[in-house]
């Protein structure tokens, strides 16, 4: 799936961007909620306006989960088991939404990283986010 070089690149990206986790995560979420309005149903009980405390808090959780997962990419299934169960059985998030958020995260990363988000970075991050999304959505019924 991912080469050792790609894994190191992904870890490096998340390490650099984790200090801005709330901003990056909130922007990716807001992008998803704007582009795919049907995803708002999962956030009906929260204030999802730009820069809201709820959006920033959830954005931080997302980026921190992605950063944590990047530390052990080979064991994502084990690492994400609690999140997988929570999103599938309690929140009942349809797996398509993880793919939509992944796309929005790639766009957001490209905006924040600029020229440093090379084609190689893009490809590696796309593979990682696809794997992350697949694991999170696997238990959905």
Image: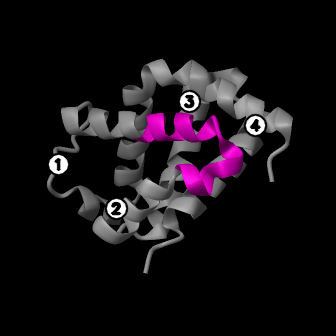
Question: Where 130 falls versus 118 (above or below)?
Answer: below
**Mark 1 or mark 2, which is nearer to you?**
1
Q: Give the position of the N terminus as an image quadrant.
A: bottom right
Reading the image, the residue beneath label 1 is 46
Return the disc, 4 or 2, that comes first in the chain's sequence. 4
**Mark 1 or mark 3, which is nearer to you?**
1
Q: Residue 111 carries which label?
A: 3
Reading the image, the residue beneath label 4 is 7
Left or right, 39 with respect to 74, comes to left
- The residues tagged by marks 4 and 3 sit, at their Cα atoms, a distance apart of 21 Å
Q: Is there CB contact under 8 Å for labels 4 and 2? A: no
Element class at badge 3: helix
Left or right, 33 with respect to 47, comes to right
**Mark 4 or mark 2, which is nearer to you?**
4
Residue 12 image offset from top left, x and y in percent: 67, 24
Q: Residue 39 carries which label?
A: 2
Residue 122 image offset from top left, x and y in percent: 72, 39
Residue 104 image offset from top left, x and y in percent: 51, 47
Number of residues whose C-alpha sits closer than 10 Å to that of mark 3, classed few (under 14), some (14–19) or many (20 or more): few
Element class at badge 2: helix
Return the disc, 4 or 3, that comes first in the chain's sequence. 4
């Amino acid at each position: 799936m991912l080469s050792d070089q790609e894994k190191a690149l992904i870890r490096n990206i998340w390490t650099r961007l984790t200090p801005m986790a709330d901003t990056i995560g909130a922007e990716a979420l807001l992008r998803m909620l704007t582009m795919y309005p049907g995803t708002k149903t999962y956030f009906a009980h929260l204030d999802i306006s730009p820069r809201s405390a709820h959006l920033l808090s959830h954005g931080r959780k997302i980026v921190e989960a992605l950063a944590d997962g990047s530390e052990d990419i080979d064991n994502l299934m084990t690492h994400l088991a609690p999140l997988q169960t929570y999103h599938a059985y309690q929140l009942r998030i349809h797996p398509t939404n993880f793919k939509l958020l992944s796309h929005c995260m790639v766009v957001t990363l490209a905006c924040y990283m600029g020229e440093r988000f090379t084609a190689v970075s893009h490809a590696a991050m796309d593979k990682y986010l696809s794997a992350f999304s697949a694991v999170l959505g696997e238990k959905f019924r």
